[in-house]
Amino acid sequence: MNNLTENLFTKFILALSPMEDVTDTTFRKICKTYGADLVFTEFVAADGLIRNAEKSKKKLKFDEDERPIGIQLFGNNAESLVIAARIAEEADPDFIDLNFGCPVKKIVDKGGGAALLKDIPKMISITSEVIKNTHKPVFVKTRLGWDEKNLVITQLAEQLQDAGISALTIHGRTKAQMYKGEADWTLIGEVKNNPRIRIPIIGNGDIDSPQKALEMKNRYGVNGIMIGRAAIGNPWIFKDIKEYLKSGVISDPPMISERIEIVIQHLSSSINNKGERLAVLEMRKHYSSIFRALADFKQFRMKLVTVNSFSEIKEVLDEIADFYK
């Protein structure tokens, strides 16, 4: 086990799942502020890095206060992923993460992400080559298998460990399930409790409350959990889980003033990084979660998702502050 995994996994960790067009540097830093122990870049196309594509290069950038951070790569062959890993290594992340779990059609159709679950020898070969050709620890994220008839994760985890990975994240669904139905953690537990497994195992899927986090921790013994969709508009979930694990107390929901402060902080930072137009558009996906459970909020949400400037959003936020005094 390398220094990163030795130091990081001395405690039960909370990781922020990489999500395209969500987990940019602004959102990652906010989640770190609220207790996320581990973050990942949005996933980066290996071929895009090799072509020097601007969008791919931008995803490699992060700030020092985001550490520990991994750059997540996806691709469909060893040669391109080795080159991409070397390029990513120059950005000096704490580790490289290989995505063998994304079920999105445009990724799978090109042989990347979860497509490798249909060709395990190729997945292992890619992983081995990347590990041989980078000085950084290599993590992998994958799923239970391609479909219910091909639940390969128990054996696959051993193969990936033997290839030399430093940690494994398992999403408790198959590729065929996409994000539907409930995540099945039983096989995640089997992997973790396999006496041959020595690497840290992070469980992923449907963790949307402190109670669920504690249940999965206790029931399956994983080294950490990864939180994805439940963190969108809700960076407080990391703080809430840590408080619950420590004291058994459910934290009070954030006050209106704190919610408004997060919107302003998020938008201001995003505007600096991406420009006002894109920042305002991307922020729209967060409002429902940030202001969840507020009575009569619909009228304000409609305004927030239709205005097109930071100044107009601040005016709506002032209305919200006055309305919920």
Image (tube, rainbow, N blue to C red):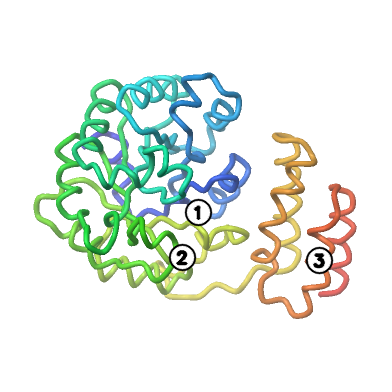
Residue type at mark 3: give it. Met
The furthest residue to the bottom: 295
Mark 1 surroundings within 10 Å by alpha-carbon count, few (fewer than 14), some (14 through 19), many (20 or more) = many
Residue at 75%, 60% in the rendered image? 260
- Mark 3 sits on what residue? 302
Q: Are marks 2 and 1 in contact (CB under 8 Å)?
A: yes
Badge 3 or badge 1: first in the primary sequence: 1
Find residue 136 and report its horizontal and vertical position in percent: 33, 27
Q: CA distance from mark 2 to mark 1?
A: 9 Å
Q: CA distance from mark 3 to mark 2?
A: 31 Å
Residue 35, numbered circle: 1
Q: Residue at x 33, y 23 (%)?
A: 82
- Are the two marked residues, 3 and 1, in contact with CB atoms closer than 8 angstroms? no
Q: Residue 71 is drawn in which quadrant?
A: top left
Q: Residue at x 84, y 63 (%)?
A: 303
Q: Which residue reaches farthest front?
A: 109
User: Along the polypeptide, which appears first: circle 3 or circle 2?
Assistant: 2
Disc 1 residue type? Gly
Task: State the SS at label 2.
Answer: helix
Nearer to me, 75 or 321: 75
Q: Earlier in the sequence, mark 2 or mark 1?
A: 1
| Residue under pointer 2 | 241
Q: Secondary structure at mark 3?
A: helix
